[in-house]
Amino acid sequence: MSETISVIGAGAWGTALAVLLARAGKPVTLWMRNPETAAELTRTRHNPRLPNAILPENLRLTAELPTADILLMAVPTQHLRAILTQLPPSPAPLVLCCKGLESGTLSLPPELTGTRPTAMLTGPNFAHEIAANLPAAAVLATPDPTLRAALMTALKTSTLRLYGSPDIIGAALGGAAKNVIAIAAGAVIGAGLGENARAALITRGLAEIARLAAALGGRAETVSGLSGLGDLLLTCTGPSSRNFSLGFALGEGQTLTEILANRASVTEGITTAPALLARAAAAGVEMPITEAVTQLLAGQTSIAETMATLMGRALKDE
């Protein structure tokens, strides 16, 4: 019999993963905080967070934190610590499906789980495409090779190809930092600064993420894979990206307050940018694009001033 799987968090990403795994015939439970919402979704088999997906009949919905052989944590990073403290005692491994850094502590998701067996599931994946059964690939990162092999076997499907990695810190950092670079890429396109500028930002953004990964004990080469470059390409070019679209609106001249007033979903890059910059400063790593995005989000600079600063930096070899 297949391992039982609980997906904790019924946002678009958690719902997409639950739909994918349930459709593959795996025993899956999807947890959401509100009992009324769980009852409504059980009745309608439809989650407004993922409008075009039908919830399979074999997908169980609940508002009580469940136990399972594998727990997929798909809650926003800022809520991860609180949810972890509420989980029933269990030796089940945690698969972190959230991206970002915790504000205040500057911790990456794997740094919040203590001694519990932990892996990261991350990569260039839009929730609506995963739920639509379109082909995709992701990284399953954990330093434990036995756990890595077991989780890859348990979570693979015919449309989601998994690649293993021992570098959980590098994978987590790539998934977090790409949201910040995507805001920069969106701002460049929204401001009409051209594809050349976007390509340069993506490439140099990758370089600064790799520097920080190495400084935090990860591998710089991890950032060149699905959890770094792959995620960057998708998030910096796909109009479905929340972070790219937010940056695009900033580039067009809207204020952050105006943009957020029309959004219900979480845009992780907003909280990630200042946390990432602070983490980099503590590690002695220079991240000029991340610094520029942080200042832009805080209203401390304009697009024109930001580009002038970046273009005017001292010349150096690549």
Image (tube, rainbow, N blue to C red):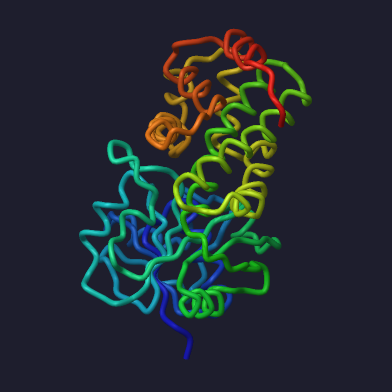
Asked if residue 315 lies left or right of residue 184, the reply is: right
Residue in view at x 67 percent, y 15 percent: 311
Asked if residue 201 lies left or right of residue 208, the reply is: right
Picture coordinates of residue 236 (x, y %)?
Answer: 65, 36
Asked if residue 120 lies left or right of residue 199, the reply is: left
Picture coordinates of residue 168 (x, y %)?
Answer: 48, 59
Q: Nearer the viewer, residue 110 or 262?
A: 110
Residue in view at x 27 percent, y 56 percent: 83
Judged from this view, the residue extending furthest toward the front is 317
Q: Nearer the viewer, residue 110 or 315?
A: 315
Number of marks drawn = 0
Q: Nearer the viewer, residue 52 or 133?
A: 133
Picture coordinates of residue 302 (x, y %)?
Answer: 54, 10
Report the quarter where the C terminus lies. Answer: top right
Picture coordinates of residue 99 (x, y %)?
Answer: 46, 48
Q: Is residue 85 above or below residue 310?
A: below
Q: Is residue 70 above or below residue 139?
A: below
Residue 93 placement: quadrant: bottom left
Residue in view at x 41 percent, y 29 percent: 274
Judged from this view, the residue extending furthest toward the bottom is 1
Residue in view at x 39 percent, y 42 percent: 101
